[in-house]
């Protein structure tokens, strides 16, 4: 029976021919994919940022890839010091004497006339709650002071010396050469607010001693262990001022130059809110957190991710992506093969929400392409065989 072997040989040749055709089609695909491997190889000298306008039209903007070197680190430090110096200058103000406001309590003494002391309450009527005023003359919500034999005195916006002078003039109608003493009994009109990662957040009253930025943190119990000392925000008159206390000390800016005003809000952010994303060919991709003083260098972030994976990473392709959600992102490149480059990595300061990406080497990218394409090739072969 010679027919069956002929049919078998013919079928076998068809399968082999199908395999050869599939391999021939897959080979160019493999070679082409090596250039577009899933290692997300950065293009130099520029990448492309994609944005969309109001009509949904796609816009592409070239993003330069800037090499990390000593000159770049010097430039970034100078920019940070300039921004910090400008914020300090805008927030610094001339210290002026305390002026009375609504809610303040005054202790007024008219010498040789003890009967007038009864008007400010008996000495035994001490405040039972923190919100209760101490005995004395309370400035009403209109800023006025009511005093016997004088009547209504506009006290808001005046110092105690000015109020004392007005009362002495008013009392001359009833007394001969009156001697008056006015002092603050309770400061209740002005306050600032400290929020975030401090031990005792809340309102802090302002008194006749000017409260500086450092005083505000100290009166709130100091920084908590979770605080990011490099990310403070001072809100004044509807405007936010980012402050970096660590850079202030390192740059010679004294936090005591910043005097807080009535209504200021100081917020201390947590280190968890200032993380840096480390991904790519590292031992353990993770979110790197700043140190206790709020600083985080590129080498610190890579160290928290378990260092660069020596088997799969291309140490010459380390990138830092900054402002990735904006229309003008910034990309910095570091060739970490040289020991000198690691010195630069230790000096390159990262910012909140930066992305550190370590690219893979060529063999890793080629291996990933094979892992993606071989299942499809095998499926095509099985389908061809089953179809025959």
Image (cartoon, rainbow, N blue to C red):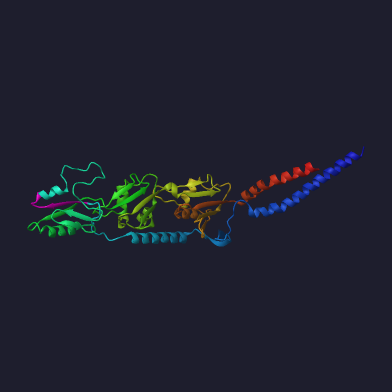
Of the 4 image quadrants, the one containing the C terminus is: top right
Name the one closer to the observer, 349 or 311: 349
- In the depicted structure, whether residue 81 falls above or below residue 4: below
Residue 5 at x, y = what percent? 88, 40
Residue 305 at x, y = what percent? 50, 46
Residue at figure coordinates x 42%, y 47% from the top left? 271
- In the depicted structure, whether residue 193 falls above or below residue 43: above
Q: Is residue 357 left or right of residue 362?
A: left
Name the one closer to the observer, 293 or 133: 133
Q: Is residue 85 left or right of residue 336?
A: left
Q: Is residue 31 left or right of residue 208?
A: right
Determine the image quadrant of residue 257: bottom left
Determine the image quadrant of residue 7: top right
Q: How many marks?
A: 0
- In the depicted structure, whether residue 263 falls above or below residue 3: below
Q: Residue furthest right?
A: 1
Q: Main secondary structure of the magenta part?
A: strand
Name the one closer to the observer, 375 or 317: 375
Q: Is residue 47 magenta?
A: no
Of the 4 image quadrants, the one containing the N terminus is: top right
- In the depicted structure, whether residue 131 falls above or below residue 349: above
Determine the image quadrant of residue 73: bottom left
Q: Is residue 107 left or right of residue 77?
A: left
Residue 238 at x, y = what percent? 37, 57
Residue 41 at x, y = what percent? 59, 54
Q: Which residues are magenta?
A: 105-114
């Amino acid at each position: 029976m010679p027919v069956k072997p002929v049919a078998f040989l013919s079928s076998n040749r068809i399968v082999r021919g199908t395999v050869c055709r599939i391999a021939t089609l897959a080979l160019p695909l493999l070679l082409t994919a090596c250039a577009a491997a899933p290692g997300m190889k950065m293009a130099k000298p520029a990448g492309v940022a994609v944005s969309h306008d109001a009509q949904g039209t796609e816009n592409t903007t070239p993003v330069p890839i800037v090499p990390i070197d000593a000159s770049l680190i010097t430039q970034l430090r100078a920019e940070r010091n300039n921004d910090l110096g400008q914020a300090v200058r805008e927030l610094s103000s001339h210290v002026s004497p305390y002026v009375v406001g609504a809610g303040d309590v005054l202790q007024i003494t008219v010498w040789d006339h003890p009967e007038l002391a009864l008007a400010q309450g008996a000495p035994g009527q001490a405040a039972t709650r923190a919100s209760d005023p101490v005995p004395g003359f309370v400035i009403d919500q209109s800023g006025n002071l009511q005093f016997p034999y004088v009547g209504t005195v506009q006290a808001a916006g005046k110092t105690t010396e000015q109020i004392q002078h007005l009362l002495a003039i008013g009392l001359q109608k009833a007394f001969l050469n009156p001697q008056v003493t006015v002092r603050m009994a309770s400061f209740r009109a002005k306050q600032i607010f400290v929020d975030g990662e401090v031990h005792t957040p809340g309102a802090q009253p302002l008194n006749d001693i000017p409260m500086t930025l450092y005083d505000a943190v100290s009166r709130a119990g100091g920084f908590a262990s979770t605080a990011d000392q490099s990310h403070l925000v001072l809100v004044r008159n509807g405007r936010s001022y980012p402050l970096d206390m660590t850079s202030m000390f390192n740059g010679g800016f004294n936090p005591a130059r910043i005097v807080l005003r009535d209504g200021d809000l100081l917020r201390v952010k947590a280190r968890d809110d200032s993380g840096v994303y480390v991904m790519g060919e590292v031992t353990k991709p993770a979110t790197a957190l700043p140190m206790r003083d709020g600083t985080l260098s590129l080498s610190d972030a890579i160290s928290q991710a378990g260092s660069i994976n020596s088997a799969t990473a291309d140490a010459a392709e380390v990138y830092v992506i900054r402002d990735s959600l904006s229309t003008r992102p910034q990309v910095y490149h570091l060739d970490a093969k040289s020991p000198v480059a690691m010195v630069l990595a230790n000096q390159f300061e990262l910012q909140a929400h930066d992305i550190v990406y370590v690219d893979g080497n060529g063999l890793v990218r080629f291996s990933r392409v094979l892992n993606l394409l071989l299942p499809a090739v095998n499926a095509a072969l099985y389908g061809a065989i089953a179809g025959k």
